[in-house]
Image (cartoon, rainbow, N blue to C red):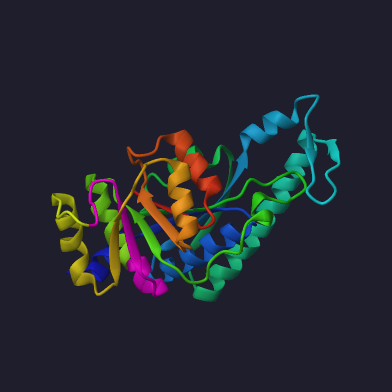
Amino acid sequence: MTVEEECRSSVRRIVVTLDASACGRAALEIASQLAAEMQAELQGLFVEDVDLLRLANLPFACEVLLANAIPRQLGAAQIQSAFRSCAAKVRQALTEAADQRRLRWSFQVLQGDVVRTSRAAAEHAELLILGWAETTAGGSSQAAVRKPLATVGSILAIDDGSSGSDRVLRVAVELAQVKRSELLVLSPAAGTGARTPRRRQIDQCLQSSRVEYAVQLLPAADARTIAGLAERLRSRLLLLVLRSDLLDESELEILVKRLECPLALVP
């Protein structure tokens, strides 16, 4: 069985967690295109940030808009209204993407924190893609001050050396083929010069894929380093094991909110 056939036969459901930001739109585009290629069901998820709701209930809570730098009172009703508006936009975008590619799809709104809720929802899925920016009550987000998302660039795969990393590499190959991108593997265990055992395993996994790839040493396994590398390399997508030992839950949340591209988590 080829790499392409193995990926296509194993992926049955793709969960995409997104908001109405540019990063959310990029995540939906990648997820819907991949679902069409793999004949998988697409499940859209919008998460109402429970921490933001708790914050809105505090008597001194306010927000400062970028447009005029004037603080204004922040209330729970205002937050809920912003969530409903954003969820409606996300559902409409999902509907259009699914109809365009004739996908089986579903959509749900859950309350919690983005990373933990998304990982729980994707526990029985084959792929989780997150495209998220912290949405404010006024409907703006951090994405408004970010650089435009790259339309060209590498697919990045973080290889943590675990058994799940082989699956990450296989899915990364499929995505690189779908997006016609180069594949860059970042590994803390496989240097660019020394022929380490893990480097040999990576080469064995990828050499038959007909995808142009390179392997680089990951200098530090923390969210800020990884996000900085993704930005400098103008990454289109970053892949990582769903429950990797490299990043704990708090670091993973930092990564999701700092990335300028969608993050794909592979169970």
Numbered circles on residues, count: 0
Rendering coords of residue 97 (x, y %): 56, 69
The magenta stretch spans residue 239: no
**Where on the picture, by quarter, is residue 155?**
bottom left
Q: Is residue 179 above or below residue 109?
A: below
Question: What residue sits 27% from the left and 55% below the top?
Answer: 167
Name the one closer to the observer, 167 or 250: 250
Name the one closer to the observer, 77 or 143: 143
Q: Which residues are magenta?
A: 174-192
From the viewer's perspective, is 126 left or right of 71? left
**Where on the picture, by quarter, is residue 205?**
bottom left
Residue 118 visible in the displayed image: no
From the viewer's perspective, is 209 left or right of 68? left
Residue furthest front in the image: 193
Rendering coords of residue 253 (x, y %): 50, 40
From the viewer's perspective, is 96 left or right of 238? right
Question: What residue sits 39% from the left and 75% below the top?
Answer: 180
Rendering coords of residue 120 (x, y %): 44, 40
Image quarter in which the N terminus is found: bottom left
Residue 60 visible in the displayed image: yes
From the viewer's perspective, is 237 left or right of 148? left
Question: What residue sits 56% from the left and 64% below the top?
Answer: 149
Question: What residue sits 74% from the left and 40% below the top?
Answer: 79
Q: Is residue 226 above or below residue 1?
A: above
